[in-house]
Amino acid sequence: MDAQFEKNTFTKRLKTMLKVDFKRMFTMPLVYILAGVSLALPILILVMTSTMGGGEAGGMFTNVWQAISSVSGGDAAAAMSMDLTTMCNMNLMYFAIAVLVCVFTAEDFRSGYAKNLFTVRSKKIDYVFSKTLVLFAGGAIMILMYFIGAMLGGAIAGLPFTMEGFNAGGIVACLFAKIFLVAVFVAIFFTFAVIAKQRTWLSILLAIGVGAFMFMMIPMMTPLNANFIHVIMTLAGGAIFAVGLGAISNVILNKTSLV
């Protein structure tokens, strides 16, 4: 009887890589530290701003949902203003996600894991897509932890949960849009990470620089009064960036030294 060998397809290789990357990520203390920070940050922000004047002080939070996002529409100048609620809401998490992406990727090159992996496994595209998916999952967890923290912080601070200019459906769409937008930022940050490789400081500097440049776009893509269109746009954007920048990251890994 002739021996039959199972074909090693991209799907099977990716599945194997995902198992390894998920295991490696969830054994890193950094993941749990960032998850804890994501949970604690909105609690601290809402409680501290409440003790400093709450809804009566100009620029302070008047309801819990401002810690998640803002309502689109209205006066354009007001929408672009950088007040307390604009700066201190869920959008801060994208900077924390930059740290996760850059540190996790740099550790692969610093420890020699990436070099050993590519010596045995020539398909760098497997590594790129596995890392993108795993880091997206890590970023989504941070977004969800922040949301839980905001609900707890709002309850502790005694802020109202009233919805003005949006409804529960808008909040759900907003949350999904923010999660899908993580894929866009992960793809961008990961590209910088494979450029910098073990130089964590360089990848974080590049990632935060681009993140700051894109910061004002986030409220427009993920408002509290989001709808199905916002969800589809961020989902499509995440997929396009993941595939497009994933291909670029693959070229970078193929054309540059792994040390």
Image: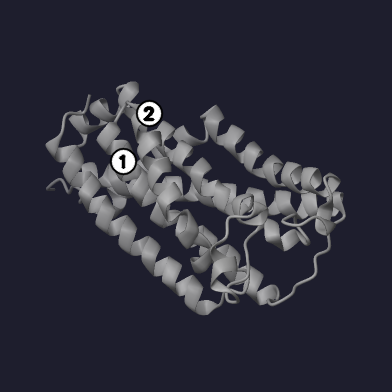
Question: Compared to 84, does 111 lie above or below?
Answer: above
* Residue to which mark 1 is pinned: 192
- Which is more toward the observer, 193 or 51? 51
Q: Which residue is located at x 83 percent, y 63 percent? A: 160
Residue 41 lies left or right of residue 221; in this view the side is right
Label 2 neighbourhood size at 10 Å, few (<14), some (14-19), many (20+)?
many
Residue at figure coordinates x 27%, y 46% from the top left = 126
Left or right of 253 in this view: 73: right
Q: Position of residue 96 (x, y in %)?
A: 52, 41
| Mark 2, residue position | 200
Residue 238 rendering spot, x and y as whole percentages: 39, 61
Q: Is residue 25 above or below residue 79?
A: above
Q: Position of residue 73 (x, y in %)?
A: 58, 76
The answer to whether 44 appears left or right of 3 in the picture is right
Tag 2 secondary structure: helix
Instruction: Return the x and y of residue 94 as percentages of the image width and height.
Output: 50, 48
* Residue 122 visible in the shown view: no
Query: How was the colour assigned to the protein in this rendering?
Result: one colour
Q: Nearer the viewer, residue 8 or 31?
A: 31
Name the residue located 68 percent from the left edge and 42 percent from the top edge. Answer: 41
Residue 98 lies, with reference to residue 148, above or below; the image says above
Residue 165 seen by the camera: yes
> Quick check: 108 above or below 3?
above
